[in-house]
Amino acid sequence: MKNKILFIINGYGLGNSTRCSAIIEYLKAKGYEIDCITSNNSTFYFSGNENISALLEFSPLKYSTTSEGEISSLLTFINGPRLLKSFIKNVRILKKRIENENYKAVVIDSDYSILPLIFKKSFTLVAINNAEQTVASSEGLPTKNREIFFQYLLERLDCSFHRLVPDLVLAPQWQPAPENTSNIKALPLIVRSGYQSTASPGKLSKILMMFSGAGFQINQRIIRELILPRDVTMDVLGLEGEDSENIRFHGKVHDSSEFVKNCNVMIINAGFSSISEALALKKPMLLLPVNNHYEQLTNALGIENLGVGQIGNPLNLQFDLNEFLSKYQQYTEVFKKTTIECNGASLAAGHIDQLIKSKS
């Protein structure tokens, strides 16, 4: 009988799922049977994935946002009873699954439904998390804003959880990494197979704008009215809309890989995984971080400091896009001088495999 591993993945956005799918591919090749519990768009993403033996769905848990798309701690607190009800439901689903299956390891990525079960756990607990990097990279980021400060405190709490609870934490990094602690291993970027740059950047001709479902939303009318340079087209993923002359809306797509590989530049939020794949493929980025999202702000500032992209504002998109595109050659020159390691997925699978074998 094959050894089984359970992945529990936060489905708020797709970044957690894309990096987990990369690790799952390597674990499958090592002979493991993989089950997955997730929610929201990630359920859609994993449906039909041949590397997954069983796919279960959690009730979604996410921050509440204002009508302008800003994360709101007040609204999240008001929705607390509903969130607690969903959390308890998820814990019951998880408890039943773990009791009925003999998992050699449980791998969590930004989901904490396992917390009530850790005191009687009979499995190895592995986490994929880069809160340590987020906190280490936060110097200079303003925290006077109440919402940002609330997010900052959550990141500190996240750090403490991962230092104390999991047997192993796999921490992908693209900025200078904090030193490894006893249970935290810094890794290169975790990206899906085929996400490494092999071609020269070429002439600017294709822009890709991606919506992940994690609060990154712009009125489609604003996008349709964007004025692009001559002979430049834009593909928009994750948002329905009416096509214009050189802008095409594709809605929700199951696999974005070909769009990502074939574009010259990307307009994305500042989630860690989407940035990782853009870095791996050496695509300059116009970043629109979710308002009041602490981790995304630190990620976006890191990309600006690296010199391969800039932060934009959805309310000033045309101006920011023009400025960004005018620096296309500048960004590509920086990428030519930048070495980016992208073998984190295979290393992560190797660490999980070694840990399971050491406890057998």
Image (cartoon, rainbow, N blue to C red):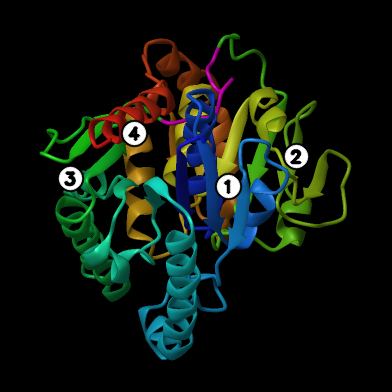
Taking depth in this image into account, of 349 and 254 the one nearest to the observer is 349
Q: Residue at x 45, y 43 (%)?
A: 5
Residue 85, above or below 14: below
From the image, tell me which residue sits under label 3: 136
The image shows residue 146 at horizontal and vertical percentages of 27, 75
Question: Rounded to the nearest whole Å, what is the CA distance between mark 2 and mark 3?
Answer: 35 Å
- Mark 4–mark 3 Cα distance, whole angstroms, equals 25 Å
Residue with the mark numbered 4: 352
Do residues under tags 4 and 3 come within 8 Å of each other at their CB atoms? no
Q: SS for tag 1?
A: helix
| Residue 4 x/y as whole percent | 47, 42
Q: Amino acid at mark 4?
A: Ile
Instruction: Residue 270: tell me if it is visible.
Output: no
Which residue corresponds to the image point at 61% horizontal and 42% vertical from the top-left?
A: 52
Tell me which corner region of the image, top left, top right, bottom left or bottom right, holds residue 144. bottom left
The magenta segment is: 190-197
Residue 185 in sight: yes
Q: Secondary structure at mark 2?
A: strand
- Compare residues 31 and 276 and report the one nearer the observer: 31
Q: Nearer the viewer, mark 4 or mark 3?
A: 4
- Locate residue 52 relative to residue 181 in the image: left or right: right
Looking at the rendered structure, the kind of residue marked 3 is Ala
Number of on-image labels: 4
